[in-house]
Amino acid sequence: MRRLVAIAGAVALAAALVLPASAGTFLSNGWRGKAPVTITLINVSVTDHFLVQGITEAAANWSKASAVEVVVGGRGKNKVYLYESAYGTNFCMACTSLQGSTYTTGASIFFNDTLMTGLDNLGVPGYYKRGIVCHEVGHALGLDHVEDPSIETCMQPGGNYDHPALSDFDHLAALYGG
Ligand SMILES: [Zn+2]
């Protein structure tokens, strides 16, 4: 976990230095390329019904942004690998690791069954897990958290929404053009 946080921290710092006007909006400079940039989600080991559903939905919802085209599977470039396993209680419930310095060159998303079991036991509705997928894919695209509670987006840390907001699409346009 420490390594993941360190990577994300370094990327966020780089983004803040390069994009001072929008510091806090971007987690990274995004993937290299101009809009529409294709991002490919590769499901390596995700089996939870709601998470699998969330992958399809996240691809469809984020693709509504003019700047990106998010597809599932296939031989596309800009791959984001998605894993699900019992990583233990010292790991995040869900987190994204970005590779690359100036640009994102690879990404991995981890869903932790050890902690998600708690969600299941609480009987949280399926949209919550779909929202987690939406959130992590947003990070993989280069977006940081949205702290404004009036914006209904999955990029809020609270996990109340399972879809992105139009303002997220604007941020992606700022990253990639388009
Ligand atoms: Zn987050």
Image: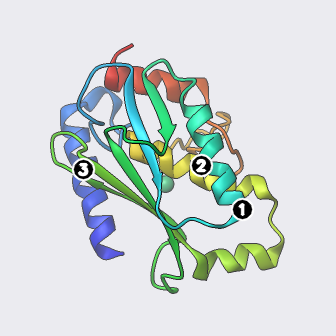
Amino acid identity at mark 1: His
Looking at the image, what colour scheme do you see? rainbow
Q: SS at mark 1? A: helix
Position above or below: 117 against 39: below
Identify which residue is drawn at 29% across, 20% down.
34
Q: Is residue 74 visible?
A: yes
Q: Which of marks 3 and 1 is nearer the N terminus?
A: 3
Q: Residue furthest front?
A: 75
Decide: few, some or many residues near mark 1? Use Cα within 10 Å; few <14, some 14-19, many ≥20.
few
Q: SS at mark 2? A: helix
List the residue tagged with mark 1. Answer: 49
Identify which residue is drawn at 39% across, 30% down.
38
Instruction: Give the Cα separation between the discs numbered 3 and 1.
Output: 32 Å
Residue situated in front as seen by the camera: 19 or 134: 134
Identify which residue is drawn at 42% across, 27% down.
172
Q: Where in the figure is residue 128, as x and y percent of width and height?
A: 72, 56
List the residue tagged with mark 2. Answer: 55
Q: Are marks 3 and 2 in contact (CB under 8 Å)?
A: no
Q: Where in the figure is residue 130, as x and y percent of width and height?
A: 67, 52
Amino acid identity at mark 2: Ile
Residue situated in front as seen by the camera: 40 or 129: 40
List the residue tagged with mark 3. Answer: 11
User: Quick check: is the Cβ at mark 2 less than 8 Å away from ligand 1?
Assistant: no
